[in-house]
Amino acid sequence: MTLIKEHKYIEAVGRRKTSTARVRITPAAKTSLVINEREFEKYFPTAELRNVVLSVFKDMPGEFSVTAKLNGGGISSQAQALRHGIARAMIENEPDLRTKLKVQGFLKRDPRAKERRKFGLKKARKAPQWSKR
């Protein structure tokens, strides 16, 4: 059972560090991605970032049109947030994909983020040089 037939699209949110991706997927004749009203290849210039996002579509049934609004963070964390959002939307559409995507690690929101700086220290954990006298 696909939910897209009942509605026009499926919306999901993906996150990584401080990046947020609001993703909408709709069925289409050919898979296409539009990010912040720009072409996918223009938004993610390197092949590595494109592969991060497109890894979700491996072994997926059907073709989808994906539109996403990305904000916050850097380009790498935005790519991972987009992948997370697409995976969540796919699960809503096709619940049988859950185990496959979960094994690949696409459904987990990666919690790693930069630790805050503490007072009295130079960085989060780096202390100033200690001198005996």
Image (cartoon, rainbow, N blue to C red):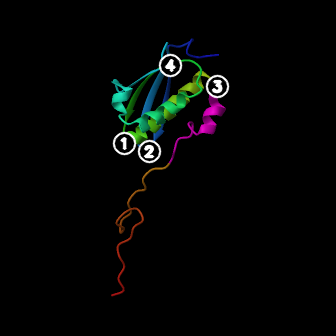
What is the x, y in percent for residue 39? 35, 24
Which comes before the other along the chain, label 4 or label 1? Answer: 4
Say left or right for 132 vs 58.
left
Q: Judge whether residue 92 can be spotted in this image.
A: yes
Residue, disc 2: 17
Front residue of 121/36: it is 36
Residue, disc 4: 64
Residue, disc 3: 95
Give, as a single range, the part of the protein colored magenta: 96-111
Which comes before the other along the chain, label 2 or label 4? Answer: 2
Per the image, label 2 sits on a secondary structure element best described as loop
Which comes before the other along the chain, label 2 or label 1? Answer: 2
- The amino acid marked with disc number 3 is Pro
Per the image, label 1 sits on a secondary structure element best described as loop
Whether pointer 2 and pointer 1 mark residues with C-beta atoms closer than 8 Å, the reply is yes
3D distance between C-alphas at marks 1 and 3: 31 Å
Q: Is residue 105 magenta?
A: yes
Q: Is residue 27 magenta?
A: no
- Above or below 122: residue 70: above
3D distance between C-alphas at marks 2 and 1: 9 Å
- The amino acid marked with disc number 4 is Phe
